[in-house]
Amino acid sequence: MSERARWYVVHTYSGYENKVKATIEKTIENRNLQELFVDIQVPMEEVIEEKDGKQKVTLKKKFPGYVLIKMLMSDESWYVVRNTRGVTGFVGPGSKPVPLTEEEIESMGIVELPQEIDLEVGEGVRVISGPLRDFVALVQEINAEKHKIKASVDMFGRETLAELDFNQIEKLV
């Protein structure tokens, strides 16, 4: 199924990105359209801000006003996206949806989430991206549905619980 699914960029009203994502996900569930939609992302990036002399990591939208959707283009999937409140249209000439190229997908940092990860609670992982990069963490909890884990990281002699995406970690061998 996902062989023919392609990534498309959808333009939204600014500030509506997460609402559009949630609405489309709900519509997919209600209409049982899982075979048409593979993934929906509002790409975020971690930004380190300094406030009152303290560094704080916050998440900011990488592309404000845009949602990325991997789907099979059909009349029905086009209709669902196009008629979602907050969507102004697909990115492409004359609002004709144009799928992203492999190069664009890579340069935009779209992450294809692995569907499964071979991990167990108590195992060690190395963080391979983000502010905790190169830290070793101990898996405390695995949420396969959301493609995330909770792991404890030893930071400055203190155990800190961090939530990490599957694509941010690799299993220690």
Image (spheres, grey):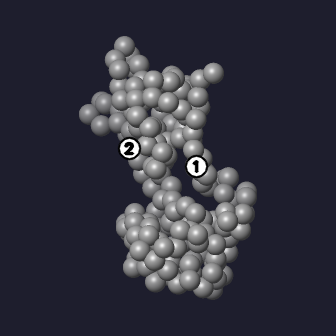
Using the image, tell me which numbered label, if any, was put on residue 50: none
Which residue is found at the position 59% from the left and 72% from the top?
Answer: 36
State whether residue 118 is above or below residue 114: above
State whether residue 7 is above or below residue 58: below
Residue 14 shows up from this direction? no
Q: What element carries label 2?
A: strand
Using the image, tell me which numbered label, if any, was put on residue 58: 2
Which residue is found at the position 60% from the left and 47% from the top?
Answer: 114
Estimate the x, y position of residue 31 in percent, counting from the top left.
46, 77
Q: Residue furthest left?
A: 52
Estimate the x, y position of residue 155 in percent, counting from the top left.
40, 20
Image position of 33 (left or right of 17) = right
- Are there few (<14), some (14-19), or many (20+) residues within 10 Å of tag 2? few
Q: Which of 123 and 71 lies nearest the eye of the viewer? A: 123
Q: To which residue does mark 1 refer?
A: 115
Question: What residue type is disc 2 on?
Answer: Thr
